[in-house]
Image (spheres, rainbow, N blue to C red):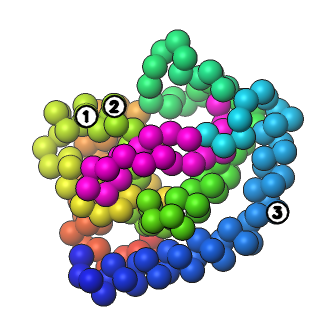
Amino acid sequence: QSRLLRLYQRATNLLGAGIGLLLVSPLMLLVAVAIKLDSPGPVIYRQTRVGRGGRPFEILKFRSMRADAEKASGPVWAQTRDPRVTRLGAWLRKLRFDELPQLWNVLRGDMNFVGPRPERPVFVQQFRESIPYYDVRHSVRPGITGWAQVNRDYGASLEDAREKLEFDLFYIKNLSVWLDLFI
């Protein structure tokens, strides 16, 4: 990444996240109230993810699962018709409203709008051991969306992660303002 591209990305991320938070704050308030009314537990879900340089950070999301979703099982991939997802959570996920708090992550500099989706440390460790070049995706800031997200569904297996990595590596190799705008 050139210094100019990094500066451009940071400036557009700050501006976009600031404006985005102002515009969607009424919607975020409604979602927060709806979550509180739908199920017990916190409104915002914090989860450790792996970011640029392999550094961990806390991603923010609206809670779409039961508060104790992984208490018995530990970390597991989300599934189709996941029984841990609340009634409201299913709609939040379908509309991608659960991702809105990540605008704060963008504002803080943890994430960009566009980049490889950040994964949880337990899965990153598995992928590092099984997928060659997996850590290359950590050479850029993770994103709210990315080339793999617009071309693939949610990943739920090692093979899915391998295929998503191909898209992430394509994005990193061809990183440009135009590709970000296209995505």
Q: Residue 125, which numbered label? A: 1
Question: Is residue 52 in the magenta section?
Answer: yes
Secondary structure category for the residue under label 2: helix
Q: Residue at x 71, y 35 (%)?
A: 42
Badge 1 density bin: few <14, some 14–19, many ≥20, Cα 10 Å: few
Residue occupying the point 82% across, 32% down: 38
**Magenta segment, prevailing SS (helix, strand or loop):** strand
Provide the residue span drawn in magenta.
46-65
Indicate yes or no whether the magenta region holds residue 103: no
Quadrant of the rendered image containing residue 33: top right
Identify the image quadrant of the C terminus. Answer: bottom left
Decide: few, some or many residues near mark 3? Use Cα within 10 Å; few <14, some 14-19, many ≥20.
Answer: few
Q: Nearer the viewer, residue 78 or 150?
A: 78
Q: Which residue is mark 2?
A: 122
Label 2 amino acid? Answer: Val
Q: Can you give x and y, in whole percent of width and height, for residue 28 in the image? A: 76, 56
Q: CA distance from mark 3 to mark 1?
A: 38 Å
Residue 154: % across, % down: 46, 42
* Residue identifier under label 3: 26
